[in-house]
């Protein structure tokens, strides 16, 4: 049978690298099949995808050996642009792949390059949008789309070129669970209706097993396991340890102490007709480990932008330790409320871990003696001591995220807001970060964790706040929150999975 | 991510008209040193920006990160330009820090010119990117029969600017979260604080450039030398008018700058001298 993908002894080493990113990979996939590629960070998943559509070695220099035959073509003999007719590749970050100012312009870009007649493109675009669940979006500005919509648009942009093979690198990494389910539902329909061959890089196979024909597990550039999903599952550790390993959270006293953060009647809209936050009221108490959850576009990020003064608010709407947030200077606020963002590379700029941690302290006016003492203490506390003199960019993403956390916690903020800290991290990176956050919480730091991952939230947080359409839908203990399946479903957090999660692992904070 | 653009109905100039405007503006910018000339260009550009739908706040926002650079331009040019002015009053010493470090009137004016040149370039680029869809650029490249490699390079660069700006905002947010205040302290402190933005921005710029070029290849850009034309470039009455005015302006810039024999006939030597320092 003619294979969609046939790799034979494929090895690749990036120019200047010491080790091979892929070593002796031999693998094949039948037309219309769906394969999921899994594995820890830097295991070679993205490199393999790039080899499949010729970006390696055409756009990325290095040493390639072995044969890569995709859609019956030897990819080394054709340009990526030529292969794009048959092989579609959706990269991880949707932002960088959107080229049009409107959805129509963006979707037309690929077919226009392939010289598809204008009339045909006009007919095709509504069809593709409907396939991906964005029907009627033709005239929307791409800048106005939510993260989930952008991710689907990036996929639609490739689908409009009608490839027979679709490669997707972590297509659901920024989607809420409901969005992820919808995306895979659409992809599965396409596979069934058009015979599309799918290659998907994913961290989790949960929820998509039924559509997967083959699982490929990579580690250090080698295939360590391949086969049916039920066979491969036995060797693949889930992203989070089982419930018995759960770390106990701090006890929350029955009569809460004065709030360290209070939000009273917060309303906000970017445009007058579309309110993003509607009458938000809640308090964060010392010792809280709060999970702030909700669907894409629920208003979580807008809410937290208010907490570090990036979006100004009316007087006395937000109180930090009883004081109006507007009375704080940037530095003062950073000392009280620390923020850790998804991408550590947005803040790293010094040439050693030690200097990176010291930067914030110097900036806040600490004395030299205090800086030296605090840096030592922070390195010790975060386990980064062995990397003290290393350049941050020589470390993996998990470690860079640790450095970002360390540079924030060095100034000992009483509240730490953590925005999706595990996005794009493998299970080792996730454990590293979450265990550190847990440790900080046990030492008295109040945590506000923003995440889509209900299992992760249930494992670590003691309080659950759920947002939907700019409103607080639920605010209570994690134990009680997990029981509100209707609210969790409304917020796109897939309560049916939670039920199975609870039934197998017990309650999160027991 | 692409910035929001106005609809073609509000800013319907053909890209070739915009190029003509840009060329005549460049001629005036390059040929003359007097800050008044650049001040007039500045006002015209601001007016064009407002007409295109940009707000003053949006235009200023692009200039804020360059403030330390503006300061340094003024400082170094002001103190390092003592001679070479055609008007004797411009050689007048205004302040002497030490021998060799003398602030002259001409130096100060030249500093203002350099500063305005930079400001004008930044705002013009912003207006063009804001008001011109990527489609128009590619249609122009196809029409000009540019080699695919060059077309690819320019298209990537055009997409690069808004993507990098988006990244700048994210970096700014992340640095503010750890207490970096760009507006606090003296100029040197502010300049140092900007390092915390610039270095991650440079690192991310490399990643963005890589991603963009790969994304364009994935979408088949450069598959052939041409692509499907959906909206043909079309000259309207306004375009003919703009191109004619631009041509007139370009000729004026050259004639005033290099009057030669024409200078005597048209008696424009004084005007020409006015635009020089």
Image: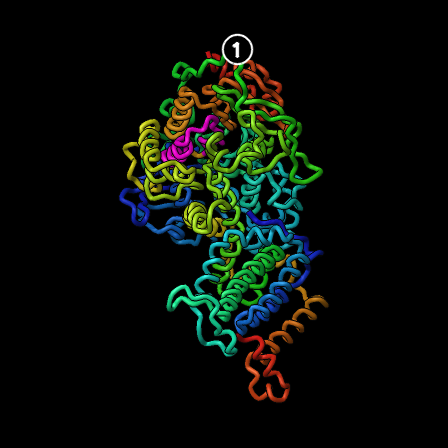
| Residue located 60% across and 75% down the image | B250
Where residue A501 appears, x then y in whole percent? Answer: 49, 17
Which residues make up the magenta segment? A399-423
The image quadrant where one finds the N terminus of chain A is top left
Picture coordinates of residue A281, whole percent (x, y): 62, 24
The structure's colour scheme is: rainbow
Q: Position of residue B264 (x, y in %)?
A: 60, 88
Q: Element type at marker 1?
A: loop
Q: Would you identify the image quadrant in which residue B42 lies?
A: bottom right
Q: Residue B109 lies in magenta, yes or no? A: no
- In depth, the one of A255 and A276 nearer the eye is A255
Instruction: Please report the residue visible at 52 percent of the width from the left and 20 percent of the height from the top.
Output: A285
Question: In terms of depth relative to the viewer, which is nearer, A486 or B108?
Answer: B108
Determine if residue A33 is in view: no
> Which residue lies at the image location 57% right of the left edge and 46% below the top edge?
A160
**Residue A358 horizontal/vertical position (percent):** 36, 37
Left or right for B95, reference A109 = left
Chain on which label 1 sits: A
User: Is A315 displayed left or right of A457 in the figure?
Assistant: right
Q: Nearer the viewer, residue B252 or B16?
A: B252
Q: Is residue A408 magenta?
A: yes
Q: Is residue B101 above or below residue A226?
A: below
Whether B147 is drawn above or below A229: the answer is: below
Q: How many marks?
A: 1
Which residue shows up at 50% across the image and 29% down it?
A211
Q: Which residue is mark 1?
A: A254
Residue B162 to residue B39: above or below: above
- In the image shown, does A252 or A261 lie closer to the viewer? A261
| Number of other residues with Cα within 10 Å of mark 1, as a class: few under 14, some 14 to 19, many 20 or more | few
Q: Is residue A262 visible?
A: yes
Q: Quadrant of residue A486?
A: top right
């Amino acid at each position: 049978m003619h294979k969609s993908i046939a790799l034979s002894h494929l090895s690749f080493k990036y120019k200047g690298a010491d080790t091979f990113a892929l070593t002796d990979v031999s693998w094949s996939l039948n037309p219309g099949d769906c394969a999921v590629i899994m594995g820890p960070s830097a295991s070679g998943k993205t490199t393999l995808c790039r080899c499949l559509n010729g970006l390696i070695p055409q756009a990325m220099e290095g040493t390639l050996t072995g044969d890569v035959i995709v859609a019956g073509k030897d990819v080394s003999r054709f340009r990526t642009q030529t292969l794009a007719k048959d092989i579609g590749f959706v990269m991880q970050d949707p932002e960088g792949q959107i080229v049009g100012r409107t959805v129509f312009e963006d979707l037309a870009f690929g077919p226009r390059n392939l010289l598809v007649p204008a009339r045909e493109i006009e007919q095709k675009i509504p069809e593709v949008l409907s396939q991906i669940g964005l029907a009627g979006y033709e005239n929307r500005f791409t800048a106005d789309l939510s993260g989930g919509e952008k991710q689907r648009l990036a996929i639609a942009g490739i689908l409009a070129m009608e490839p027979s093979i679709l490669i997707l690198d972590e297509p659901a990494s920024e989607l809420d669970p409901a969005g992820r389910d919808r995306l895979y539902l659409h992809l599965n329909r396409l596979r069934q209706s058009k015979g599309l061959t799918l290659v998907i890089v994913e961290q989790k196979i949960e929820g998509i097993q039924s559509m997967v024909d083959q699982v490929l597990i990579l580690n250090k550039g080698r295939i360590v396991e391949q086969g049916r999903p039920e066979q491969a599952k036995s060797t693949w550790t889930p992203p989070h340890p089982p419930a018995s390993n759960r770390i106990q959270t701090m006890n929350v006293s029955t009569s809460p102490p004065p709030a360290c953060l209070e939000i009273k009647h917060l309303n906000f809209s970017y445009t007058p007709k579309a309110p993003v936050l509607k009458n938000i009221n809640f308090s964060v108490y010392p010792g809280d480990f709060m999970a702030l959850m909700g669907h894409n576009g629920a208003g979580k990020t807008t809410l937290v932008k208010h907490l570090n003064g990036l979006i100004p608010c009316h007087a006395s709407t937000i109180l930090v330790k009883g004081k109006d947030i507007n009375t704080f200077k940037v530095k003062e606020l950073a000392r009280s409320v620390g923020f850790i963002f998804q991408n550590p590379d947005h803040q790293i700029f010094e040439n050693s871990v030690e200097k990176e941690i010291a930067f914030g302290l110097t900036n806040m006016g600490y004395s030299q003696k205090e800086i030296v003492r605090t840096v030592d203490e922070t390195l010790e506390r975060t386990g980064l001591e062995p990397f003290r003199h290393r350049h941050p960019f020589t470390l993996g993403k998990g470690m860079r995220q640790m450095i970002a956390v360390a540079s924030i916690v060095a100034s000992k903020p009483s509240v730490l807001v953590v925005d999706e800290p595990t996005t794009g991290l493998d299970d080792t990176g996730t454990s590293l970060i979450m265990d550190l956050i847990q440790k900080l919480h046990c030492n008295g730091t109040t945590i506000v964790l923003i995440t889509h991952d209900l299992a992760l939230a249930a494992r670590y947080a003691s309080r659950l706040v759920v947002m939907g359409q700019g409103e607080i839908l639920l605010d209570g203990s994690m134990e009680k929150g997990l029981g509100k399946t209707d609210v969790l479903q409304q917020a796109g957090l897939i309560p049916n999975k939670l039920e199975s999660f609870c039934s197998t692992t017990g309650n999160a904070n027991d | 991510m692409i910035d929001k653009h106005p609809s073609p109905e509000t800013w319907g100039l053909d890209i070739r008209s915009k190029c003509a405007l840009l060329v005549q503006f460049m001629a005036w910018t390059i040929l003359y040193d007097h800050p008044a000339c650049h001040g007039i260009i500045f006002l015209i550009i601001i007016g064009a920006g407002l007409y295109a739908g940009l707000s003053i706040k949006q235009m200023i926002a692009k200039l804020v990160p360059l403030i330390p650079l503006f300061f340094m331009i003024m400082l170094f040019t002001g103190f390092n330009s003592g001679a070479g002015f055609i008007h004797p009053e411009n050689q007048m010493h205004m302040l002497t820090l030490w021998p060799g470090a003398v602030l002259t009137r001409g130096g100060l004016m030249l500093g203002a010119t350099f500063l305005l040149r930079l400001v004008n370039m930044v705002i013009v680029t912003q207006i063009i990117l804001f008001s011109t869809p990527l489609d128009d650029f590619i249609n122009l490249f196809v029409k000009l029969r540019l080699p695919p490699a060059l077309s690819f390079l320019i298209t990537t660069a055009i997409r690069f600017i808004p993507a990098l700006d988006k990244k700048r905002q994210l970096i700014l947010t992340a640095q503010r979260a750890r207490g970096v205040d760009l507006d606090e302290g003296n100029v040197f402190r502010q300049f140092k604080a900007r390092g915390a933005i610039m270095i991650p921005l440079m690192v991310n710029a490399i990643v963005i450039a890589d991603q963009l070029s790969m994304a364009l290849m994935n979408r088949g850009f450069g598959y052939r030398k041409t692509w499907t034309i959906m909206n043909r470039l079309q000259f309207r009455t306004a375009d003919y008018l703009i191109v004619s005015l631009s041509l007139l302006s370009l000729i004026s810039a050259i004639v005033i700058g290099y009057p030669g024999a024409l200078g005597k006939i048209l008696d424009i030597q004084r005007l020409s001298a006015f635009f020089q320092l």
